[in-house]
Image: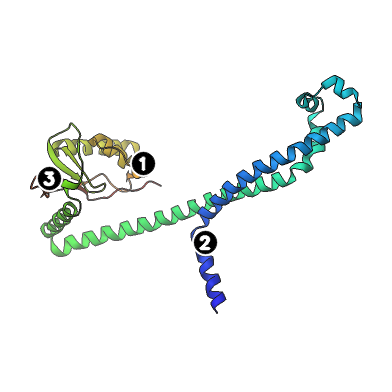
Amino acid sequence: MQVREIAKNLGGIISKNSPTILTGAAVTGLITTVIFAVRATPKALSLIDEELYSRKGDEMYGEYGSDIGERICSLPAKDVVRITWKCYIPTAGVAATTVMCIVGANHISLRRNAALASVYSLTETAFKEYQAKVVETVGKNKELKVRDDIAADHLKENPQSSNEVIFTGKGEVMCYESLSGRYFKSDMESLRKVINDLNDALRNDMYVTLNELYYEIGLPTITLGDEMGWDVENGTIKPAFSTQLTDKGEPCLVLNFEVHPRHMR
């Protein structure tokens, strides 16, 4: 029973970490391929020399000297392959295994990403239904009050005094972007103009990335910003503004979104 449980747990660990394991195996295989090729080459050169000697005897040394490159080139390519291919069987085997590991790791990663995207889409749909039902049940005003309370919690958890304020040159009002948790200086008019311009681009280009929004606002881009964004199926970018006070008592415009960016498949 214990052996079965251990095997089950081990199988789960291997399955969960299979892309990492395959990538590690591919790296090891690449190094091993180089080592095997280096080791096989002297033997292959020796076989080529034996073939030349059998054809020309000692004359080959006078004709080609010690230049092994000239000696190899003196033989037709098909003869070189015929003479030396067996030396590289281990190398070819390791190389083939390495390629399979790379393809396998990529296949598993693509399959998992597709599954995650499907789960995210279902979660997003469920959230929209829940949000609509909340508005229907408690009313729009109370729903906005909930949004304001959440924005206040964000500022409390991520206080201005502990963060750098980014000066964008597009306004002097303290702002907070809730997705990346960054404080910056801008104003309502500038933010609305950026979002309106991006929505125009969204209708023409079919999608807009999160980093495009950050760039237009004047914020540095982030690692996932090119993979997340809005597409025409997801609707336009709809800002949800809230006005709060920072821990320093300064009025702060909190930028959130009614439709959050999603992974760009």
Of residue 75 and residue 228, the one placed in the foreground of this image is 75
Q: Are marks 2 and 3 in contact (CB under 8 Å)?
A: no
N-terminal label among 2 and 3 = 2
Q: How many marks?
A: 3
Q: Is residue 4 above or below residue 13?
A: below
Label 2: few (<14), some or many (≥20) within 10 Å?
few
Residue under label 3, please give it. 252
The answer to whether residue 240 is seen in the rendering is: no
Residue under label 1, please give it. 226
Q: Is residue 168 above or below residue 120?
A: above
User: Alpha-carbon distance for marks 1 and 3?
Assistant: 27 Å
Residue for point 26% across, 60% down: 129
Mark number for residue 15?
Answer: 2
**Which amino acid lies under the numbered mark 2 shown in the image of this protein?**
Ser
224 vs 110, left or right, is left
**Quadrant containing the N terminus in the rendered view:** bottom right
Q: Are marks 1 and 2 in contact (CB under 8 Å)?
A: no
Label 3 element class: strand
Mark number for residue 12?
Answer: none
Quadrant of res 86: top right
N-terminal label among 1 and 2 = 2
Marks 1, 2: nearer the viewer: 2
Residue 74: % across, % down: 81, 25
User: Alpha-carbon distance for marks 1 and 2?
Assistant: 29 Å
Of residue 82 and residue 138, the one placed in the foreground of this image is 82
**Which amino acid lies under the numbered mark 1 shown in the image of this protein?**
Asp
Label 2 element class: helix
